[in-house]
Image: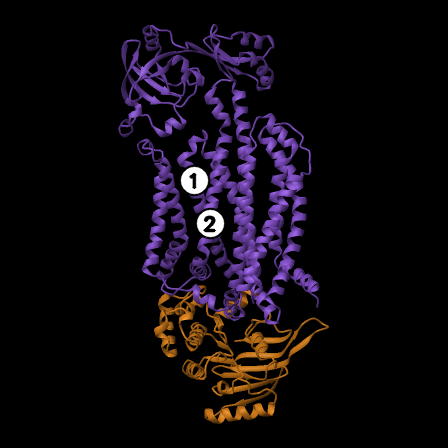
Amino acid sequence: MTLSRLIFRSMRKNLKQYYLYFFALIFSVTLCFSFTTLQYNPSVIEALEQSGTASTGFKVASYILYVIITLFVLYASQLFMKRRSKEIGLYQLIGMTKGLVVRLIALENIVLFVLAVCIGMIFGFFSSRLFAMILMKMLEIDMVINLSFSKEAFNQSVLIFAILLVVIILQLVWMVRRVSLLSLFSATKQADERVKRFSIFESIMGLLGLLLIAFGYYFSTILFDVKISFLNNLFLNMIIILASTMLGTFLFFRYSVSLIMNAIRTRKKGHLKVSDVLAITPIMHRMKGNSKSLTLITLLTGLAVGIMSLSYISYYSSGTNARQASPYDYILLNNKGTEFLEQLELEGIQYEQDTYSISTVMLNIKDLVSEHIGEVAIFEGESETTVVPLSDLHKIEPDVQLADGEAALTSYVNVLAEIMQLNAGKEITVKAGETEIPLYITEIREDFLLSEHVAQGSPILVVTDEMFKEIQSNNVEETAFTSQIGINLTDKKDRERAEEIYKPYERYIVNEETGASFPLPSYEELRKRNITGLGLTIFVTAFLGFAFLLTTGSILYFKQMAEAEDERESYRILRKIGFSTNELLKGIYAKQAFNFGVPLVIGLLHSYFAVKSGWWLFGTEMVAPLIITMSLYVIMYAVFAVLSIQYYKKVVRESL
Amino acid sequence: MSVLVGRKIRKIYGKKSTAQEVLKGIDIEVSKGEFVGIMGPSGSGKTTLLNVLCSIDHPTEGVVEINGQSLSGMKEKELAKFRREQLGFIFQDYNLLDTLTVKENILLPFSISKLPKAAAESRLKELVELLGITDILNKYPNEVSGGQKQRTSAARALITNPTLVFADEPTGALDSKSATALLTNLEKINQHKSATIMMVTHDSVAASFCSRVLFLKDGAIYTEVYRGDKTRQQFFQQIMNTQSVLGGDGYDA
């Protein structure tokens, strides 16, 4: 038989046996090529330039993608090569030289790669259009995306996979050198290494792992506590949290799992159930070999879900964010620009308007924070705080009640509210002009009523109408803002026209003479800016998250396939002595629930605590985006779990 | 009373063009308390016969009844239950799970069929004392010797008080001392607990522990010899003689 025929034959056999490796390759090429094609697509570039979004995000993301793909392909090839070590040994046993074996398998890999790159590029070319359409949808840009073949994308993808191929062949050379004929005959040795007793050291490490994770979680919840974080070591604290959860995760998989399972198992004193036999004991004994990859998968899952959630939170919050900056569709200050209203009426556009009276007092915020936060020096001194009368607040919240001498604070959320919580039920003294006025704060509210330019990010004080008049009269100097008109369109269909009418009023002129002014964009304008700024980010993170998910899921699946093959013998024994397929499958379900569920659950927990500790830096709404991201991740993960169960089913059926 | 009845068992492997008849119409009957050996040269169909009789494999034709129950009509699930409750198995390569301790391996059949723990413990105690493996109960299979592994396997086969124990070359991987110890134990259990045992072997020494030995040749029963009142030595001699008549690679163990 000539070499080429041998290659062809073994290829045909292996393609059937290792079709998954082939799929993994095709899939990687698709992912890589579709992303780079998208990156170099002229319509996309044009659209991004129009919306003023920087394309550096794309560049960074493509490098991350290359890293993911490289790791994935290397891992897959190693996994599948390992399975062939016997075959390689056999070739040598029948007298082939190592060089010939390397050439044989290298050629096989070259053919495989070339095929995969060709097929993957076809898929990638078409899927890139789909991705481009998703991106445009996210950016709210109406644009027809043209399919265009990019030479740069082609070159880059080919280069990446050529390098990968070289690395894999080098790996192969190393592996063939290492495989000795002896290893052909030492199949049983593996089992000896697998089964070991538990030492005290392992028990301690197991406990330590759990403690480290718990500590990391706890520390993350107080990370932004003012007293701790303002002492300049925020970065150090983050490193501590990361290190402790990462190390904890590893120790958990390496020791804690076995420890817990061994505890369950010893308690049964030898009387095991099917699930113990098929899930607990094999997992326990495999943990040593599996711990590294499970740790990696868990951390990657945590990272991916965390980043995806955060970027989704910002995207999701783009509307609310804009609402906080501009609580009304359009805002006019100090009665300037009322011509806008006339024009609206002229065009027959219906609207509602609320008018607010505005004044200011001097307030010492230190009076309202909890004691331990108050010690931090930055709260010393008084600050100007905007005041509105209760009757104005009633325009959006009719139920609020205040008695004489009472007041409420509102518009207090987000970053400030997270870092320093204000407490209601406190007596404070405010200063209006030179007069000191005692007030009792009844509650801290979250409504937004004034433009961000008025409130300047501070909370707004709401007082009774009488008190407001008193404050107004005491303020000798005129305050910067005395009134605000908030306008909401009755019919959102008019928005497009109204935006055009508003254009000339977009700048608020502070002083006609000096020409000092500041922008006063409409709500819609603010929202659009947020969307275009974040759309690309979320698209890129979602794409990367998707890549993470598919690669980690595939790795778990490949590993489970290998494990199923290893367990085939156990299944044969069990079926011989009278376990039915269904009974075995019950145990296998439990085992797969662990293998897929635990990395997923811990990964999600990691991301939950990570997101929870700092989400407010990114947006205004945590629960919904987090739940949506996590659910999508879980569903896609479940697909891999189901696939692996199908594989186990096949193995169990064939085992007898 | 017959525990096992096999009638006109035929087994054909392969498709029509490549069909190979491994069992050519075998009739067999085993009474309660018997210790039956099946011998024959390689390829004579010993293991196939055992697999068919113990429900792991299906006969192409013919009937197998154990304890009056026919195996042919049963579904996979029923067969599994039947094997678990009525049959015990001892294999050449022990077939123990590496991840379980000796005790867990022995109690494995009870992981599905519910038996009160106390009852299981007392059965376990009796068996391990009889087989002399009390000291290794908490060890893993890879920490004990081949002989001990095989006795563990025997204990697992016997723990359910099966109607019939099938042993496929149980001494194949053991040195002669461990083999003799195991066979003595099996003989003892056969006599004391009147367990019915059916053993495939091509070792004449092992066969000499049986009360009856069947000889298979080319898929059919060639002859059978009974031990009767003979000593083991005499019976061994008789088996050797039969084998030489049978010819071929008779003594290849």
Q: Residues within 10 Å of mark 1 (few under 14, many from 20)?
A: many
Give the color of chain A as drawn: purple
Q: Residue A198's spot in the image, x, y percent?
A: 36, 61
Q: Residue B67's spot in the image, x, y percent?
A: 52, 76
The foreground one among A529 and A221 is A529
Is any part of residue A170 visible from this angle?
yes
Q: Residues within 10 Å of mark 2 (few under 14, many from 20)?
A: some
Give the color of chain B as drawn: orange
Residue type beneath disc 2: Leu
Please report, as a chain letter, where disc 2 is located. Answer: A
User: Above or below — where is B154 with respect to A441?
Assistant: below
Residue type beneath disc 1: Tyr
Dot placed on the residue nearer the N-terminal end, 2 or 1: 2
User: Above or below — where is A444 with respect to A353?
Assistant: below
Look at mark 2 in the image and give the residue it sits on.
A296
The foreground one among B160 and B70 is B160
Q: Secondary structure at mark 1?
A: helix
